[in-house]
Amino acid sequence: MTSPFHTLRYRHHRYGFRAADWRREALRTNLWLVPALESLLAVVLWAGTVALDRTAYNGRLHFPDWVLAGSADGARQVLTTVAAAVITVVGLVFSITIVALTLASTQFGPRMLRNFIRDRGTQLTLGTFVASFLYMILVLVAVGPGPHGDFVPHLSITVALALTVIDLAMLIYFINHIAKAIQLPEVIAAIAGDLARAIAEQGGADASGVDGRERGLSSAELLSRMESAGAVIPTPASGYLQYLRHDRLIRIARESEAVIHLPYRPGHFLVEGSPLAVVWPAEAAPHVAANLAKGQVTGPYRTLTQDISFGIDQLVEIAIRALSPAVNDTFTALTCIDWLSDCLCRITLGWRPQRIHRDRHGYVRVIAYQVDYDRLVQRAFEKIRQAAAGMPAVMIRQLDALHKVGEQTVYPERRKVLLVQAQLILNSCDATVPEAVDRRDVELRYQALLALCGTPQPGDASALPFLTRISPRP
């Protein structure tokens, strides 16, 4: 996401996403890593400043005038007071963070919590205060008797007070940051920005390192043979499929001269014992089953790493929560629809996910399911349409969004998908909106979309094949 929830930029690889990217993403979604790293830096800083202080204590170094001076008792009193204040503020920061997480869970949905936890601003603030407290405690321990009188680490105390000023600046930043981060437009725009980057990274066809020739059986023939003679590998544990390492899967398949078919994509929930993969020839199944865990990750939640439909679902969830009778926030739903139209425009222009993965010699090794354009459009519009029954303002904005996406669409079959959604919205309007003027406003937007797509009017029999067809949902 963009600020305040900036996400890592996934680097495209010859087989898709690198495993290192996935590990970095997993490490980022926590509140302990950044504080731990900053605490380690604090220990290193303490070791350096205390070493300089001991050099000055032995008379081999003279500090400039801006370095504070004083007695050991005064140093202990200053460090104790400042450290107590810092740890108190750490508790305040944690409390504000918990309040923000609670608010996010109730207002935006529990699936938004990960976006707040992975927020770099919150992690840096917590880390700065914890590291400052640790540094001050270490400096306090260093104050003590020495061969030339009491050892007072003057430079370290000066640095501790400088860290206190930095902590004050971080506290002001954190309060402003949280105040902005919990605003719905910021949250929606951040999710949409994260989704837009995921679309850009995942939409292009991956280069499989093929030498330019395609060898072996076609994917259709391989699927046919798998259906009749393939071996099924069961799912070892229940959970959401989060990540597929296509490069590792290709290597596993090549080692046993096999082909792996994955009927599920990242984002699907897998039940223990259900089919995870199909392998052909069947005799290669034991080797593939023993190594398949190295090529996929299953967990308790969904991520955007290889699942852009999750980003769409996040925006849709906020919209349908806003449309619920308990909230009744129409304008938030309209904002979500606007950003959904932006993301669908990006998908319309460049969504070409690869389903067939070949090894470097051109043989098909992995056939992986990918979500198609039809399903992405359905996910973006259907639940909101169902929640917006009797609300012409939302229906009009959805038709406007379809019009924007249609302007970017050059493929006739994709325009038909948009028209199907428009027809469903019009049907909902006719069934649930009692005012004729409101129905007329909705119909005008519908007619504008028909004119954009160069489609005959609904009375024309030639329009029926795609005005009434509902696309299958894979």
Image (cartoon, helix red, strand yellow):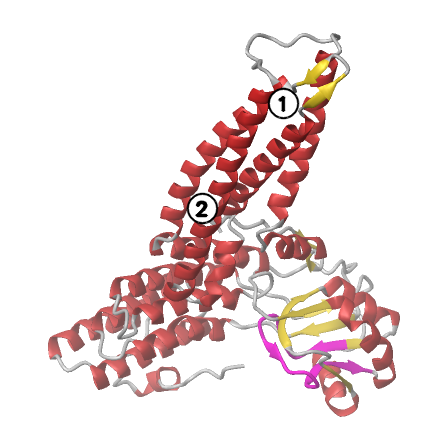
| Residue 3 in sight in this render | no
Is residue 88 or residue 73 the one in the foreground? 73
- Side of 296 where 390 appears, left or right: left
Tell me how many marks there are. 2
The numbered mark, 1 or 2, whose residue comes first in the sequence reads 2
Q: Is residue 61 left or right of residue 108?
A: right
Task: Pick out the residue farthest to the bottom.
Answer: 228
- Which residue position holds label 2? 92
Q: Residue at coordinates 65% horizontally, 19% vertically from top-left?
A: 152
Looking at the image, is 444 positioned above or below residue 95? below
The kind of residue tagged 1 is Ser
Give the percent coordinates (x, y) of residue 430: 22, 83
Q: Position of residue 416 (x, y in %)?
A: 40, 76
What's drawn in magenta, residue-wise?
Answer: 260-280
Instruction: Say which of 177 and 169 sits in front.
Output: 169
Q: Is residue 61 above or below residue 266?
A: above
User: What residue appears at the point 72 percent right and 89 percent down from the top-left corner?
Assistant: 227
Name which residue lies at 73% across and 61% down. Answer: 208
Would you name the residue on which mark 1 appears?
A: 156
